[in-house]
């Protein structure tokens, strides 16, 4: 079966972006209502529980992605029996994982108070609330979460996005209503597992309707199970670094600085992650198509596509970074007020972290699509350990700035080692040093664009003596729309290779509506 890559990529990107934008705006609304109806401590408490359970959920890392990778070939060959056997393997694995996370979560009950520096709100029973969050984390493993792999592998992420949209409106709408009517954190929290059950039922029903021929039955051979376990282990270890970045930060902030500091940190990280989530719609929409191309086309052809995709993606990510540099503080002042803001220097650290993470995203897409997780296992272990150790040291002495710096340092230390495997194991004729140099150039161009845009916005604000926070935000927003893109166009259009990429991408979009 040859996947309709262009059509699916367009559909997945469209619905993925819509779903992610809604998934940013609605939680933003709920977070605002929560902080203003209750207090920042309650928001910090929810963020802390989420971070703790994300650490426990590391046992799942790699399972679904490795299964999706293992499905590319049987889907291309229309091997229904093997697809059913893989699905059966995943269902059993998820049951085991759900039990493990439940037991690990229960074992943490005695130490919960030690993870919070502040006094817990008087109307909260820490243990009951934690059990609600724990149930929300494990319930998916016992329902139909395994079926979403079929949708992902067939590049039908648009269905997942549509169902997630319904889930988001149900969850966040009810949470807003409950906060406004009852001003009770328990009512707010218990809606989480109810909504999670609904989402699993929607995805399970959609999968059964679209792929009725696939049932969890049959067994994989010993060789296939061994290969799958290796891929799962490699991917799980590889993902540990990324999965623990924010979770360690929140836990350390809570233990050292208190729940209000967790709220301030997560307000800034929420914006970073929101932008990252929208960009994730791009990478998520193309990964299955690239996986199909890796099976059906040569590494040389895929390498040329890699160069073009990386260029376009860095243009988009660079523009987003400039917007963050200019809009972060005006937006935070308007949203939360001066008391819940970070210094400009710490804000710029968040922008630097974002740009650093984006430089490796397209590399990561090909890394995953080619199934190279095992080769990067050491990198992720080192990053997670280094991040935790630096968090404990720098967070104690430098607060939130030290915590963000710890993440930047740990990510930078392992970036060059981990990014090489796509070039050494798949793009064997690819120019790795050229890739690093190109990323450095992108970085310098983006930082320069940010300085120019910020300076231009400040001149306009000073010249017209603008005082309103809302007008200041609007001035910077208009500046961000115009100046960085003009600067990028001036820089890149004079380079023949980049100019060729721009023309080729425009032709692709005109012909098929997609850049894939």
Image: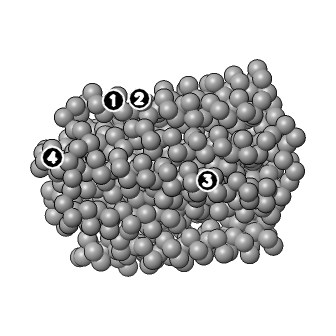
The residue identified by callout 2 is 202
Secondary structure of the residue carrying numbered label 4: helix
Position of residue 178 relative to residue 135, above or below, is above
Position of residue 364 relative to residue 2, above or below, is below
- The N terminus: image quadrant: top left
Secondary structure of the residue carrying numbered label 2: helix
Residue located 81% across and 40% down the image: 124
Q: Is residue 113 left or right of residue 414?
A: right
Q: Earlier along the polypeptide chain: callout 3 or callout 2?
A: 3
Say few, some or many: other residues with alpha carbon within 10 Å of mark 1 (under 14 / 14 to 19 / 20 or more).
Answer: some
Q: Are marks 3 and 4 in contact (CB under 8 Å)?
A: no
Residue 504 spot, x, y in % from top left: 26, 52
Numbered mark located on residue 206 in the image: 1
The residue identified by callout 3 is 105
Position of residue 306 relative to residue 135, above or below, is below
Residue 102 spot, x, y in % from top left: 56, 50
Q: Earlier along the polypeptide chain: callout 3 or callout 1?
A: 3
Secondary structure of the residue carrying numbered label 3: helix
Q: Are marks 4 and 1 in contact (CB under 8 Å)?
A: no
Q: Are marks 1 and 2 in contact (CB under 8 Å)?
A: yes
Q: Nearer the viewer, mark 2 or mark 4?
A: 4
């Amino acid at each position: 079966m040859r996947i309709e890559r262009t059509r699916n990529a367009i559909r997945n990107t469209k619905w993925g972006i819509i779903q992610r934008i809604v998934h940013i705006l609605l939680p933003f609304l709920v977070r605002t209502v929560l902080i203003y109806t209750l207090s920042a401590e309650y928001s910090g408490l929810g963020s802390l529980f989420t971070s703790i359970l994300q650490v426990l959920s590391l046992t799942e890392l790699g399972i679904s992605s490795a299964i999706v990778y293992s499905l590319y070939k049987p889907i291309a060959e229309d091997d229904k029996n093997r697809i059913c056997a893989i699905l059966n393997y995943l269902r059993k694995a998820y049951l085991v994982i759900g039990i493990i996370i439940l037991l690990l979560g229960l074992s943490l009950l005695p130490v919960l108070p030690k993870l919070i520096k502040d006094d817990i709100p008087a109307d909260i029973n820490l243990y009951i609330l934690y059990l609600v969050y724990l149930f929300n984390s494990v319930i998916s493993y016992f329902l139909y979460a395994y079926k979403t792999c079929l949708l992902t592998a067939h590049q039908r992420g648009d269905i997942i996005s549509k169902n997630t949209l319904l889930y988001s409106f149900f969850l966040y709408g009810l949470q807003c209503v409950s906060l406004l009517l009852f001003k009770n954190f328990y009512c707010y929290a218990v809606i989480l597992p109810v909504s999670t059950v609904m989402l699993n039922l929607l995805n399970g029903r959609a999968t059964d309707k679209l792929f009725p021929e696939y049932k969890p039955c049959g067994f994989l051979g010993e060789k296939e199970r061994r290969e799958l376990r290796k891929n799962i282990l490699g991917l799980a270890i590889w993902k540990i670094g990324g999965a623990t970045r924010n979770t360690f930060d929140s836990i350390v902030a809570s233990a050292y600085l208190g729940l209000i500091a967790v709220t301030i940190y997560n307000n800034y990280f929420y914006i970073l992650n929101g932008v990252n989530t929208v960009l994730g719609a791009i990478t998520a929409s193309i990964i299955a198509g690239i996986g199909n191309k890796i099976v059906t086309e040569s590494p040389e052809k895929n390498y040329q596509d890699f160069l073009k995709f990386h260029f376009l993606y860095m243009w988009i990510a660079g523009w987003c970074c400039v917007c963050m540099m200019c809009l972060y503080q005006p937006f935070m002042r308007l949203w939360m007020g001066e008391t819940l803001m970070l210094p400009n220097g710490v804000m710029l650290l968040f922008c630097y972290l974002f740009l650093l993470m984006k430089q490796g995203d397209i590399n990561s897409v090909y890394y995953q699509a080619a199934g190279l997780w095992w080769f990067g296992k050491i990198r992720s272990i080192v990053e997670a350990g280094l991040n935790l150790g630096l968090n404990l040291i720098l967070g104690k002495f430098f607060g939130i700035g030290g915590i963000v710096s710890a993440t930047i340092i740990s990510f930078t230390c392992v970036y060059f080692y981990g990014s090489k495997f796509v070039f050494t194991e798949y793009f064997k004729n690819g120019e790795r040093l050229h890739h690093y140099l190109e990323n450095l150039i992108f970085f310098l161009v983006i930082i320069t664009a940010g300085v120019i845009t910020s300076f231009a916005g400040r001149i306009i604000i000073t010249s017209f003596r603008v005082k309103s926070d809302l007008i200041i935000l609007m001035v910077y927003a208009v500046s961000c729309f115009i100046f960085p893109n003009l600067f990028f166009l001036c820089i890149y259009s004079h380079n023949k290779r980049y100019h060729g990429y721009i023309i080729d991408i425009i032709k692709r979009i005109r012909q098929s509506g997609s850049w894939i």
